[in-house]
Image: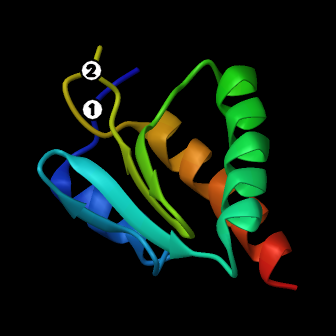
Amino acid sequence: MEKLSESDIETRLLRLPEWEYYDNAIHAEFEFENFKDCFSAMSRIAFECEALNHHPDWTNVYNNLSISLSTHDAGGVTEKDFKLAQAIESIVEEDEE
């Protein structure tokens, strides 16, 4: 998997307004109603991560979930990160409904 250029990353982020690029990774923070909803989303995200064989750096404090994505083997952000970010967005949007 090839590392994307900064301009490619910025262009792709236009479709993911919740995400930002810094420190050689894309990052997002999500807030849920409560811990149970946050943990439920994390569980569904975990299944996507396994399916894509790509795993985020993430932290959870009560109802807040912080996620950072980069492809360590490539030394930065790749298409794989955007594919997982889109899957995460779909899961989080589903929870908001």
- Amino acid bearing label 2: Ala
Q: How many marks?
A: 2
Mark 2 vs 1: CB contact within 8 A: yes
When asked about the image quadrant of residue 58, the answer is top left
Task: Identify the image quadrant of residue 89.
Answer: bottom right
User: Which residue is located at x 23 percent, y 34 percent?
Assistant: 76
Q: Position of residue 17 (x, y in %)?
A: 46, 81
User: Which quadrant of the view contains residue 61?
Assistant: bottom left
Q: Residue at x 78, y 82 (%)?
A: 96
Q: Residue at x 69, y 81 (%)?
A: 33
Q: Colour scheme of this structure image?
A: rainbow
- Residue 47 lies, in percent from the top left, at 77, 32
**Dividing the image into 4 quarters, which one contains the N terminus?**
top left
> Relative to residue 44, is residue 19 depicted above or below?
below
Q: Is residue 59 left or right of residue 22?
A: right
Residue 97 to residue 27: above or below? below
Tag shown at residue 3: 1
Whichever of labels 2 and 1 marks the residue nearer the N terminus, that label is: 1
- Disc 2 target residue: 74
- The residue carrying pointer 1 sits among few (fewer than 14), some (14 to 19) or many (20 or more) residues within 10 Å by Cα, namely some
Where 30 sits versus 66, above or below? below
Image-based side of 32 in relation to 2, left or right: right
